[in-house]
Image (spheres, rainbow, N blue to C red):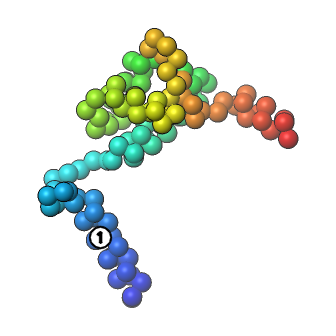
């Protein structure tokens, strides 16, 4: 029973931390943190890259994917800059981006042959 109460206490504290602002609490806040949105977006890009066997995306494709995911991004181009700064996406020039975390099946087979 003590363990269950500890879990409840941790959950309460976690929820309070989620809604705490500098001036009190904002219980109207919903949504994900930027870090969580980045993680989910990159995961979706990995799925798309695997399906189409290419880690290259046009800016318009990235915008479409983000729109389908209903991410809470106010400035999509700043979001792309964050992904670029964190080395998830590499700007290839023009409107082309390369997903850096994607490993194609040909790369996997070459890696396993090296051992």
Residue at the limit of the structure toward the top, as seen here: 94
Q: Residue at x 28, y 71 (%)?
A: 12
Is residue 52 visible in the rendered structure shown here?
Answer: no
Residue 54 drawn above or below residue 95: below
Q: Nearer the viewer, residue 64 or 92?
A: 92
Quarter location, residue 106 = top right
Q: Is residue 34 above or below residue 95?
A: below
Is 4 located above or below residue 68 in the figure?
below
Q: In the figure, is residue 25 to the left or right of 98?
A: left
Q: Residue at x 52, y 17 (%)?
A: 92
Whole-percent x and y of residue 64? 37, 24
Tell me the element at label 1.
Answer: helix
The percent position of residue 100, horizontal first and vertical second, equals 57, 31
Question: Alpha-carbon neighbours of circle 1 within 10 Å: few (<14), some, or many (≥20)?
Answer: few
Report the residue at 29% width, 34% height from top: 73
Q: Which residue is mark 1?
A: 13
81 left or right of 24 in image: right
User: Residue visible at 40% across and 28% down?
Assistant: 80
């Amino acid at each position: 029973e003590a363990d269950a109460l500890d879990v409840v206490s941790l959950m309460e504290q976690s929820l309070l931390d989620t809604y705490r602002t500098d001036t009190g609490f904002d219980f109207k806040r919903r949504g994900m943190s930027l870090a969580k949105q980045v993680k989910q977006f990159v995961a979706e890009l990995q799925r798309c890259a695997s399906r189409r066997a290419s880690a290259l995306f046009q800016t318009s494709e990235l915008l479409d994917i983000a729109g389908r995911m209903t991410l809470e991004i106010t400035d999509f181009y700043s979001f792309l800059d964050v992904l670029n700064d964190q080395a998830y996406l590499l700007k290839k020039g023009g409107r082309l981006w390369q997903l850096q975390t994607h490993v194609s099946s040909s790369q996997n087979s070459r890696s396993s042959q090296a051992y």
